[in-house]
Amino acid sequence: MSSTLLSFLIASSVLNPTMNNNHIHTLTDNNNNHIHTLTDNNNLAIVIPKQSNKILTNPGIGFTELERVVSNDPENPFYEGPPVISYPDTSTMYYRWYWDQLTTATDPQLNEKMLEDKIDSVLKIAAAVNKKVVIRFMALRGKNDPIYDPDVNKDSSGIPCWLVQELYGHGVNGGSCHLSDSEAVNMFKNPLFIHRMRQFLDVLGKRYDHNKALLRIDMGMVGTWGEWNLSGYAPSTSQSVGLTDNGYTLHDLEPYIDGLSHAFPHTPKTMLGTNQGDFLSYATTRGFGWRVDCLGDWGEGWNEMQNGYPDLIAHASDINTNIAPDFLFTQRWKKSAVDFEICQDSLQDWSRTSNPLHLTYDQVQKTFNFALEEHASLINAKSHPIPEQYQSLLKGFLNKLGYRYQLNQVDYSREVPQGGTLTINSQWQNLGVAPSYTNYPVTWRLRTADGDIVAYYTSTANIKNWLPANHYEDQSPIYKISDHFQLSPHIAKGQYFVDVGLVAKNTHMAKVLLANDTKMTTDKGLPYILNNNSDVDTPSKGSDHHQYSDNSGQYVPDNRGQYVPDNRGQYVPDNRGQYIPMDNGQYAAITSDKIKNNNDIAPYLDNYSLYSHQKMDKKSALFYVSQHSDKYIKQQNNIGRWHEITTINVI
């Protein structure tokens, strides 16, 4: 038999698998998926999608950005400061606001413009780039923290001046808004403060509780930085900065947890754990997830990794020491998220041998493993560089962190009559350490070779129920779905591609990448990578890395799924600290008037043109939506998340 004839027969069998009466045929399609035909059913075929070990950037998992949209894009699309190329791709932005950043010094009502410029802008830009936001509201700054927000009085301690006046009789008409140590320490017991806090949260809840870009609320409002301690203000006579050391009981602070639950009934919530008090278990029995700071603290003597976290976890369910124990605390991850924030400013700090808090390589591995053992979903690594020596550890870690859904097998009807029933039986695994806390319905679609989508079929399966193994090193359970879909009699006879996507509820927008290495298509049925530039070569098969641009000059993924720059040059900071091109200045920050008149991003942002946020660190910064960032927005909305699985014939 000639090689040409053999190739033709194999290609024909891939698209139209035929049955041998005594054998199961194994074939490979264009995605390197394995296709079997069964001997006991001449219309049933099985496809085994190829697995992938790539890091997946999916909603609600991985590393978070800290008060910026994107760190690792070399073009710095939102003028947020120097890019951090070593930081992984992210799906979540973490933002924090003090009370005095959302209302003026004299008006108790939340200020519309301050809300628009800060919270609204962040949520809208997150939605535009397919990201989610975690928010913390706070009432007490660090004692000597600088204030860069021009909306805030320079002597403010975190709450607006009008509230200081109500509570303590100073702060308006030229008086200082600054809280004394005693005022700050005792403020959270004050009935008037609690009443105003509830009003504050209720107004925010009415505005944001149903916002689709809001991933969850981090329980702040109590203590310094909203972190449930009194650092900087606790009297020298107290044993520590803990709330219980300063006279607080669970009864004193229940209103804060209850108040957030009342204000945001539909938004997932997390509660900070501390090594003292019964606040965390009170919250987790009410549906809160939990989080802790200082992941990676291996300091000499008492430290979080060996003492603080184990004690916290044990205390949460201890009936002898906890007046509100949560007996199911170690199982709460199945319904509510677990998040961590790293200790020190960056993983670079961990790596410096001159640092007294330096971590050994083994300690970094143990730190990551601990987060996996506790079924974590998000890690706040503060948008700072990741040392090269940790990158291999990081890949294994991110491939487990949160959920990771893999499609193992699909048996399906190879041929379906017009108006007949399409059977799709599928098998899935969650190879991560947590479920998705949002259901993204499993949806199948039929697509022509030209990309025209002729039908969608949504399964009743709920992926929130697809739990991983109890321990990150164990085998994950397999979840089986059996779906039967009635085809419209109006679907023309012919061959159709079958794609699968995990979509946003009540939409056909695929949001979750699977751990499968299949051909990817967009929501519109187009190929993931469109390369119409004849001057640019497509990466050769097997190449690890190839720098190329698509026809619009955007950044596009190489064959590893990574984004690589085209040939437009490097970027250097100007005298404002903004990043602009070396050659033509095309992407320098433009004026507000020009931005307001730019409607290029209207399909994504509803003409909300200027986005600004005053950062709470060393210097203030603005981020803008302009023609520069518009390219990044369009790119993020063109990422393929539909997986091509196989083909069927409508007869």
Image (cartoon, grey):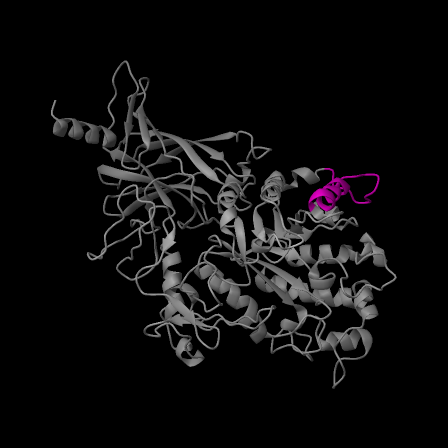
Residue 566 colored magenta?
Answer: no
- Judge whether 605 appears above or below 460 on screen: below
Q: Which residues are magenta?
A: 305-327
Front-most of residues 526 and 533:
533
Front-most of residues 622 and 294:
294
In the image, 30: left or right of 104?
left
If the image is split into quadrants, where does the C terminus sit?
top left
> Looking at the rendering, which quadrant does residue 265 occupy?
bottom right
Q: Residue furthest bottom?
A: 174
If the image is split into quadrants, where does the N terminus sit?
top left
Where residue 36 sits: x, y (%)? 31, 25
Q: Residue furthest front?
A: 354
- What residue is rendered at 28% in x and 27% in y? 27
> Looking at the rendering, which quadrant does residue 315 occupy?
top right
In the image, 194: left or right of 28?
right
Q: How many marks are shown on the rendered structure?
A: 0
Where residue 549 sits: x, y (%)? 29, 57
- What residue is rendered at 46% in x and 69% in y? 79
Judge whether residue 626 can be spotted in this image.
Answer: no
Residue 309 colored magenta?
Answer: yes
Where residue 183 sits: x, y (%)? 81, 70
- What residue is rendered at 29% in x and 55% in y? 548
Judge whether residue 457 can be spotted in this image.
Answer: yes
Where residue 285 sits: x, y (%)? 71, 44
